[in-house]
Image: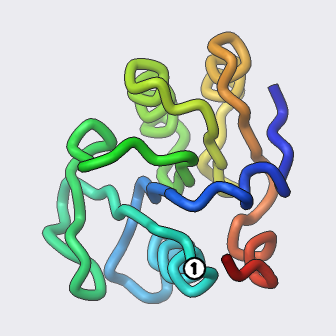
């Protein structure tokens, strides 16, 4: 099920899987852009304790609340596992940053009724959005 960009961006609680402290990486840029746009954003990376003084969580299951949408900024094989986690947790919106998607991950989203966006950059799409 292909997601609608406007519908995705209307939701306020996001998780970014693959957050990085490296300012040159998209895991950092996506996280910062969503925060700048006014979203509540949770950082996911099992190898980090924090980013920009915000806590970083090891997994989606460890979050204190369920996000409305998940932005995935990891290699395709990891995205496939993230989709399995989303299915288990009842998360039904996933935005796969370019380079993170795989046919298997997209098919798994569609099979389980998860709205998915791929081949679009959330940084560009959320740039003019302020909530």
- Say which quarter of the image contains residue 71: bottom right
Q: Residue at x 65, y 48 (%)?
A: 95
Taking 19 as reference, is 81 above or below it?
above
Q: Residue at x 80, y 39 (%)?
A: 3
Q: Residue at x 14, y 69 (%)?
A: 49
Quadrant the N terminus occupies: top right
Name of the residue lying farthest toward the front: 131
Q: Residue at x 27, y 48 (%)?
A: 63
Along the line of sight, the residue nearer the viewer: 93 or 97: 93
Along the line of sight, the residue nearer the viewer: 35 or 105: 35
State the residue position of label 1. Answer: 38
Place of residue 57 in the rendered image (x, y in percent of width and height, measured from the top left): 22, 56
Taking 107 as reference, is 46 above or below it?
below
Disc 1 element: loop
Place of residue 107 in the rendered image (x, y in percent of width and height, measured from the top left): 70, 19
Seen in the image, is 128 located left or right of residue 32?
A: right
Seen in the image, is 92 located left or right of residue 46?
A: right
Place of residue 68 in the rendered image (x, y in percent of width and height, measured from the top left): 55, 46
Q: Residues within 10 Å of mark 1 (few under 14, many from 20)?
A: some
Place of residue 56 in the rendered image (x, y in percent of width and height, measured from the top left): 23, 65
Seen in the image, is 2 located left or right of residue 95?
A: right
Taking 48 as reference, is 76 above or below it?
above
Name of the residue lying farthest toward the top: 111
Along the line of sight, the residue nearer the viewer: 47 or 112: 112
The total number of labels drawn is: 1
Quadrant the C terminus occupies: bottom right
């Amino acid at each position: 099920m292909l997601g609608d960009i406007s519908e995705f961006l209307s939701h306020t609680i996001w998780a970014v899987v693959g957050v990085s402290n490296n300012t040159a990486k998209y895991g950092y840029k996506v996280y910062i852009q969503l925060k700048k746009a006014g979203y509540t954003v949770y950082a996911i990376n099992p190898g980090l304790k924090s980013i920009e003084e915000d806590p970083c969580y090891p997994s989606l299951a460890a979050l204190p609340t369920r996000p409305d949408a998940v932005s995935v900024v990891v290699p395709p094989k990891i995205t496939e596992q993230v989709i399995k986690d989303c299915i288990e947790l009842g998360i039904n919106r996933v935005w796969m940053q370019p380079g993170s998607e795989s046919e298997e991950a997209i098919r798994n989203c569609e099979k389980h009724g998860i709205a998915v966006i791929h081949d679009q950059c959330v940084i560009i799409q959320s740039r003019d959005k302020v909530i």
